[in-house]
Amino acid sequence: MVIAFLTDVWRQKMDEMRKKEGKEEEKKEEKKEIEKLIEEKEEEEKMEKLKEEKEEEEGGERGRGG
């Protein structure tokens, strides 16, 4: 009787630990996804800024040459 009770309690604790581990893994995955999105956004902003700078340079050269 006592062994059955302790076994049941042990199983519950193990299930709780697995759930916690699962949640931690989900959080890690979400964090990785968020970091990836941030990096992509920063890269897009850099490309946009470079594009704008290039257009300004080309516009300035055209104005001087004309």
Image (cartoon, rainbow, N blue to C red):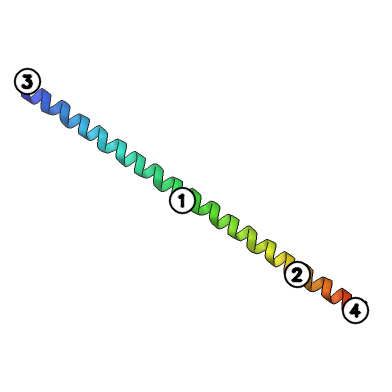
**Hey, what amino acid is under mark 4?**
Gly
The alpha-carbon separation of the residues under discs 1 and 2 comes to: 33 Å
**Sequence-first disc among 2 and 3:** 3
Alpha carbons under labels 3 and 4: distance apart: 96 Å
Tell me, for residue 65, which label it has, or none.
4
Residue 24: image quadrant is top left
Q: What residue type is labelled 3?
A: Met
Q: Earlier in the sequence, mark 2 or mark 4?
A: 2
Which residue is denoted by mark 2 in the rendering? 54
Q: Name the residue carrying label 1.
A: 32
Q: Is residue 42 left or right of residue 33?
A: right
- The numbered disc on residue 16 is none
Name the residue type under label 1.
Answer: Lys
| Residue 5 in the image, given as x and y percentages of width and height | 11, 24
Q: Which quadrant holds the C terminus?
A: bottom right
Of badges 3 and 4, the one in the foreground is 4
Q: In this view, does 63 lie to the left or right of 15?
A: right
Q: Work out whether 32 lies above or below 21.
A: below
Name which of mark 1 and mark 2 comes first in the sequence.
Answer: 1
